[in-house]
Image (cartoon, helix red, strand yellow):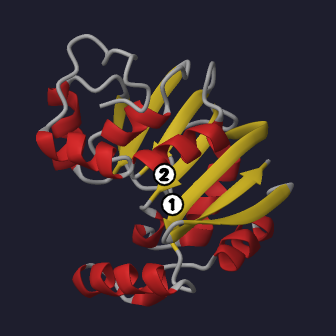
Amino acid sequence: MFANPTAPEPRGYHPSLRDRFRVRTRRRLLLRLRSVLAPDGMRLLDLGGGTGATTAEFGRGARELVVLDPEDRKTSLGRASGAPVTFVSGVAEALPFGDGRFERVTSVLSCHHFSRPDDAFREAARVLLPGGRFVVYDLDPSHWSGRAVALVIGGHHHSIDRFASPEELVRRARSVGFRTARGERFGTGAFLIAER
């Protein structure tokens, strides 16, 4: 399941077939995410990390892995699978953590679910230590394939307006006080890489 096929899964971790499939189909994305995050030895918070399967993949080597998700069903499945993460119920717009608690915060394909994205970005900055990194990956509505996928997903969950371009993600990060912020297109989506 892991990007490094020789790395063993953590003991007692039994991800579902669906989670295994997600990790396999997102392999290239998770490898890129891991290289951008550089999680080794860091305390990492994943906003909207669901069952923790992808978090366990890109966060290997982190000192601490925390998944925050509003859906108790998903976090219950993650706990039952033995995912090597700590699960916390909550929303990105009101994080239940103290200031400077993490060195890394990420949001992977969940930013479009945030009801108040500016508040979520402000909260991410608050819980990061100075020099900490905030990495967002979401579908890019300015790219034809990202727009097509966003339309399909948007039809089920939200309007396509909830998907932000890399430029909008950068603007949002700068507006809440991140010291540096840059966008990077990748596949059907885009990264925001911001530092506090």
**Eyeballing the image, is 169 above or below 7?**
below
The residue carrying mark 2 is: 29
Percent position of residue 29, x then y? 48, 51
Percent position of residue 186, x then y? 58, 64
Residue 113 lies left or right of residue 128; in this view the side is left
- What's the CA distance linking mark 2 and mark 1? 25 Å
Amino acid beneath label 2? Leu
Q: Is residue 90 visible?
A: yes
Q: Is residue 177 visible?
A: no
Q: Nearer the viewer, mark 2 or mark 1?
A: 2
Amino acid beneath label 1? Glu
Badge 1 marks a residue whose secondary structure is loop
Image point (28%, 83%), residue name? 152
**Eyeballing the image, is 182 above or below 83?**
below
Image point (73%, 70%), residue name? 170
* Residue 87 or residue 94, whichever sits in front: 87
* Residue 65 or residue 143, whichever sits in front: 143
The residue carrying mark 1 is: 93
**Eyeballing the image, is 11 above or below 98?**
above
How many numbered discs? Answer: 2
